[in-house]
Image (tube, rainbow, N blue to C red):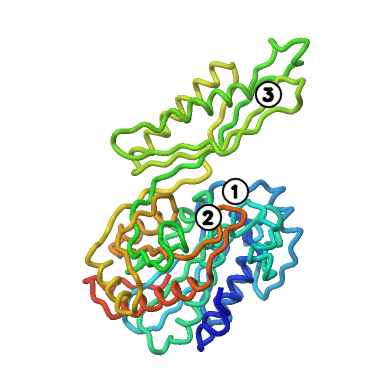
Amino acid sequence: MENINSIYSDNTMKKLADLRREFHRCPETGWLEFETTVKIISYLKSFGYEVIYGKKIHSERMGLPDESTMREHREQLKLEADFDLSEILEGYTGAVAILDTRRDGPTIAMRFDIDGNEIDEAKAENHLPNKENFASLNKNMMHACGHDGHIAIGISVARKIAERKEQLRGRFIFIFQPAEEGVKGAKSIVGTGILKEVDYFLSGHIGFGAEEGEIVCGAVGFLATSKLDIYFDGKPAHAGASPESGRNALLAAASCALNLHTLPQFGGGMSRLNVGVLKAGDARNIVPHKAEMQIETRGENEEINALLLTRVQDVVEGSAKSFGVKYKIVPVGDAPSYDKLDRDFVERLAKNLKIEGYKVTIGKAFGASEDVTYLMNEVEKNGGKSVYFMFGAKLAAPHHHNRFDFDENVLKAAYDVYMQSIDALIKFSFSIDMNRHKTL
């Protein structure tokens, strides 16, 4: 990688990289983003934003860690701030920042996800975060999907918007969303009504389906998904003396896992199912009476995903009956599909980016799930317009890999795309009623 201090004379690149590395050191998984949230709020307040956080930005949270996990993470942190942390430390993480220029113009919202993955970062010497001393300091937590970069981009755009307040028009809303991994956080934020008056919504992702140097404008092909925890409850017994008196939850779960993987067969569109975790048993000489599975379903649209979920219910129930055990299915995350392309809107944004010299592709498929679709669908339901970018970058390893890392030059490219798109949106007229503006 080139020396980041010499690439851009305005020092923007160095600020972006420094922020990215600061947040890479302290990754936190969904609903545990305590330190991350406090740092973000502190930055936003220093720029002069009105910042909303805690219970005010959440409705119904899904897939919360248990209290012991929350307590353990809280106790290892030493957080200080000049604002109340109590609700943040209860798992009401994330933040929403608002800047109103008090001049007529569009309301533009941007979303940046902030959580890490449940992964121990690689210790390899050739892994740049190790080499440059910014690897994760948290056990089994790592920014292995680029959200540390997203945070850096969001904070940097927010800083620039604040600096340019007197030259801008309209209102700006920055959403720093927790718990994207496992698609748990966006639904909670949407339920508060924060997006009701939004005219334009921007979001994006480093890497993914974009090639190195490519900017995808108006990504589509987001899959509907559901995340489920499944529990089987049987009866323990001595495996040698009286196995017949037991009810084997492990076998129920194993049979269930095999049969679940036969389900994704739909002529009307693509579907996916994965059993990611199966835990069972206490000891080799005891008939296992407890089993837990963590699974996910995905569908090209909500109809396919809903049908797949119905079949999952049937397989789980059948497996439980076959082995004489009880079962429970707990939804812990979900997201709708998104496959809409407002070509006129996206092409106007893309044209602006092409003028600046970017290699732009319109309407490329995301090919996975992202709970940003809750926010995009909500904005469009209320008459606004949405666009999702993918920022192509050289990756050291695939997303969700313990050696994941990206060429930090993509940070400046993404920052520029947001800033140029914001300027374009203020100038554009898409026949949206600007009299809708109200204070949140």
Residue 313 sits above or below residue 186 on the image? above
Q: What is the three-letter code of the residue carrying label 3?
A: His
Sequence-first disc among 2 and 3: 3
Alpha carbons under labels 1 and 2: distance apart: 23 Å
- Mark yes or no: residue 152 visible: yes
Residue where numbered disc 3 is placed: 289
Query: Label 2's element?
Result: loop
Asked if residue 432 lies left or right of residue 262, the reply is left
Q: Is mark 2 in CB contact (under 8 Å) with mark 3?
A: no
Image location (x, y in percent) of residue 22: 64, 71
Q: Residue at x 45, y 81 (%)?
A: 161
The spot of residue 321 in percent (x, y) is 54, 17
Report the disc number at residue 64: 1
Height in image: 64 above or below 98? Answer: above
Dot 1 amino acid type: Leu
Q: Counting other residues with Cα less than 10 Å from the Cα at mark 3, is it few (<14), some (14-19), or many (20 or more)?
A: many
Which of label 3 and label 1 is nearer to you? 3
Q: Is residue 230 above or below residue 285?
A: below
**Which sits earlier in the primary sequence, circle 1 or circle 2?**
1
Left or right: 98, with 379 as reference point: right
Mark 2 lies on residue: 399
Camera-near label (1 vs 2) is 2
Label 1 Cα neighbours within 10 Å, binned few <14 / some 14-19 / many ≥20:
some
Which mark is in front, 2 or 3? Answer: 2
Which residue is located at x 63 percent, y 69 percent?
Answer: 38
Residue 253 location, quadrant: top right
Which amino acid type is marked by label 2?
His
